[in-house]
Image (cartoon, rainbow, N blue to C red):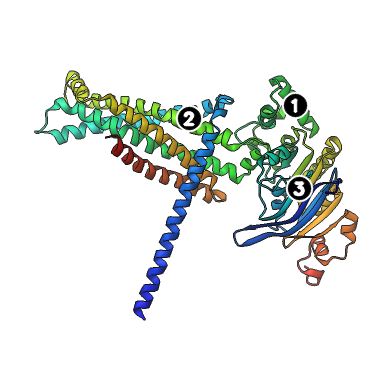
Amino acid sequence: MNGDHLIELKHLQKSFGPQKVLRDVNLEIRRGETMVIIGTSGGGKSVILKHCIGLLQPDGGEVVVDGKVISSNSHIDVKTIRKRMGMLFQGAALFDSMNVGENIKFAVREHEKQHSEADLDRIVAETLHMINLNPDFRFKMPSELSGGMKKRLGLARAIALKPEILLYDEPTTGLDPITSDVINDLIIDMQAKLGATNIVVTHDMVSAYKIADRIAMLLDGRIIFVGTPEETRATSNPYVQQFILGQRKLGGAEAE
Amino acid sequence: MVLDAIGGNFLRLVVLLWQSVEGKIAQVGEVIILFLKILRRAPWFFVNPSLTLEQLIRIGVSSLPLVMVISFFIGAVSAVQAAYQFRGFVPSNYLGTAVCKLVIIESGPVLTALVLAGRVGSAIAAQIGTMKEKEELDAMTVLDLDPLRYLALPRLISGIVSFPLLVIISDCLSIFGGWIITTLVLKVTTATYVFGLRFLFQPYDIVISLVKACVFGVIVVLMGYYHGLSAGSGAKGVGQASMKSVVSSCMLILIVDFLIVYIAY
């Protein structure tokens, strides 16, 4: 394994029934970088993310995180690696029956038993401060929050355990451009504050250009391109160009 | 030609039937594996007893008003029916016996479980189905918070504990309902009703009734959780999961009731 690569996806394959979602995905993610995976909706981007954190097991191929294969049957390895990861879900996936403070505290209380309730309250306040929110937010219920606020709090919950690897599933989908920019700034901010390695799945090119160190494009179950934002803009790959320019047909000849 | 067509259709029907049976057998296997997985986490009960207490209130205490109303009227109906069926043949001394036997052996545990399958089982299926749909179960797994430990185990223990307690309350209220009707409407004295209650009374019936209640508690919670986990997407998926949990719980309650009665008596 290359010591520079924290996560390696090797010949990853996954099918759901007759539908082959991932055919042969090969991708290396370097330690400390923000890798943005772009691709069409329903193309399997979120499936890649779920493989990285062990929520899905591949039909073929391997997921290697920090030298350990987590796509085997060894649950101990998956659990150990998972403790080093945090994930922001597409719909934030906040626990509806708990208020914001409890959402953030829940995992910390269960995994770090040494903390008193006062410590936990302090951690909640610090975490909310990291995502630029007032500590009073901890009393709100998820149903009282807007979509953007839910995403921010989903991020707060993910970073409360100080993960080394952060996975973002469509962090800006469904948000207005200004709120999207707030989320983009938060992702950049988190990388600076936590030094985390980020994998972001999105089809929002504004977001991708702003936050990415490298961009990978998934098409037909394969990674067809990997490059920096500048290389992505300049590439002659017709499929990448079609996607980043939002053209309906390849080459843009009949684009409307 | 016609025979060939009939033969082909018959074969297709057999294949379809077999596939359906095969699917059901696979489901039974999945439910048993789920049950064993939850049981394996039983020691965690002592680490988070508050989660079970919360579910005891949701499953047990919240169901009390419904169980009380239904039980009272079951007792009342039993008394009226017994009086009508006995008229001219059996003395009213045995009205209490009929109510007591019917309530303790059958209607107490079975009707309470059927009602709770609708109230508790469907609520569990809907909640777990919605949590699955909104990726809350995945979020728990990612945070290394085992859903079976934090969601399934407290519900299962609450089902096993609260169902027998609700059945005891249901039995008492049914007998009370029978007494009210017997004394106020049928004009039978309390002493006669109590004589009937004590006549042929066997503590063994209560033991079997409580065993049934525990098993029914497991069935209702397990079916709710299983169908919640298997829920399809959207409101339709969650609605169907609720419906399936109620239907399968009710069927299993009646089948298992027969098996327990057959073995115990």
Q: Are marks 2 and 3 on the same chain?
A: no
Mark 3 or 1: in front is 3
Disc 2 sits on a residue from what chain? B
* Relative horizontal placement of residue B6, taking residue B124 as reference (left or right): left
Q: Residues within 10 Å of mark 2 (few under 14, many from 20)?
A: many
Provide the residue designation for mark 1. A123
Disc 3 sits on a residue from what chain? A
Question: Would you place residue A176 above or below residue B143 in this image?
Answer: below
Q: Quadrant of residue B7?
A: bottom left
Provide the residue designation for mark 3. A64
Disc 1 sits on a residue from what chain? A
| Cα–Cα gap, marks 2 and 1 | 32 Å
Q: In this orientation, does residue B132 appear?
A: yes
| Cα–Cα gap, marks 3 and 1 | 31 Å
Q: Quadrant of residue A25?
A: bottom right
Q: What residue lies at 25% left-to-right and 25% top-to-bottom? A: B202
Q: Quadrant of residue A239?
A: bottom right
Mark 2 or 3: in front is 3
* Relative horizontal placement of residue A231, taking residue B182 as reference (left or right): right
Q: Are marks 3 and 1 on the same chain?
A: yes
Marking on residue B158: 2
Q: Earlier in the sequence, mark 3 or mark 1?
A: 3
Q: Residues within 10 Å of mark 1 (few under 14, many from 20)?
A: some
**What element does badge 3 sit on?**
strand
Give the quarter of the figure containing the C terminus of chain A. bottom right
Are circles 2 and 3 on residues that touch, CB within 8 Å?
no
| Cα–Cα gap, marks 2 and 3 | 41 Å
The residue lying furthest to the top in this view is: B191
